[in-house]
Image: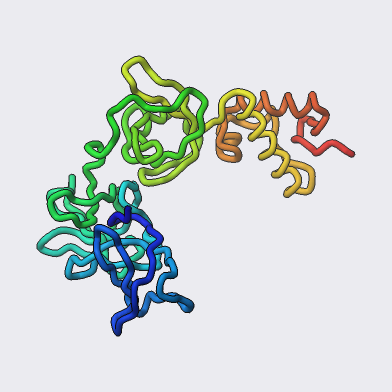
Amino acid sequence: MPQIGQRATLPVLRESKFGLYLDGGDLGRILLPTREMPANWSVGAFVDVFLHHDSEDRPVATMKQPKAVAGDFAKLKCVSVTGVGAFLDWGLPKDLMVPFREQKTRMVPGKSYLVHVFVDEETGRLIGTTRLTRHLDKTPPPWRGGEKVDIILFAKTPLGYKAVIENTHTGLLFANQVFQDVQPGERFTAYIADRRPDGKIDLTLNAPGRQRMDDLSEQILNELKARGGFWPIGDHSSAEEIKDELGVSKRTFKQTIGALLKARTITADGKGIRLAAT
């Protein structure tokens, strides 16, 4: 069933001077404005569109893809503030409104904010909110340790960074697991490190066990090839240098280098590491 805030593939009913009318099911006829019409179309043919509201709060279709759909979390830039709220650039001509009641702190034009996009139950309109936690799932998470997930950071804490996992649950990325500069609103591929008895989820940016070493091995070999076969990095390098270059701890680096040496893929001396002659 077509829903506001999502993409849908809808059949063309007819053409008018305003554009194409599409069959929106329970939403009724939905206009795809003339400026949005595809080059080739016919009555009965299907078009893939995103559904939202026009300036008069009528359902309308667009061929464009916004930066976030209903249910998503995204970092968006505030472009204006009016008497009803703030408006964010989400990639469509009509900006996304964040009512004042949905702002934890008053938004300022020119600044970017992490928001959740959803359909307001009272008005049926798409809006944004910075009150994120109320839109997170409180049921037991479905993931097990070691599983790969997509995350977006939303708050820094003394322990690390809170993150939204797969647009549904929240988890914690501990500071000692982060070997690069990160900011709220950034997206990463992460892994479930642990599911605690209280239901909370610990995250890591490093793949578990063998997979982590395989990924780092590939990264090191690709860097060696790009450098012509030699890289002045090794046991003599500081932990900070390794962190800056590869985003991992020196211990993980040494374990991976050891495996590459054992496989005779590389050689090493006091100056650095080299691709082994083939």
Above or below 149: residue 87: below
Q: Residue furthest bottom?
A: 17
Query: Which residue occupies the foreground of this view, 190 or 262?
Result: 190
Residue 272 % position (x, y):
75, 35
Residue 189 % position (x, y):
49, 39
Q: Quadrant of residue 46?
A: bottom left
Q: Residue furthest front?
A: 44
Quadrant for the C terminus, please.
Answer: top right
Residue 96 % position (x, y):
25, 60
Above or below 185: residue 203: above
Q: Residue furthest left?
A: 83
Q: Quadrant of residue 159?
A: top left
Q: Quadrant of residue 254?
A: top right
Query: Which residue occupies the foreground of this view, 241 or 16?
Result: 16
Report whether 109 appears left or right of 174: left
Name the image colouring. Answer: rainbow
Report whether 6 appears left or right of 129: right
Q: Is residue 109 visible?
A: no
Residue at 32 percent of width and 76 percent of height:
33
Residue at 31 percent of width and 51 percent of height:
70
Query: Which residue occupies the foreground of this view, 15 or 74?
Result: 15
Q: Is residue 93 visible?
A: yes
Q: Residue furthest right?
A: 278
Residue at 41 percent of width and 45 percent of height:
186
Residue 89 % position (x, y):
31, 62
Number of marks drawn? 0
Query: Which residue occupies the foreground of this view, 201 or 274?
Result: 201
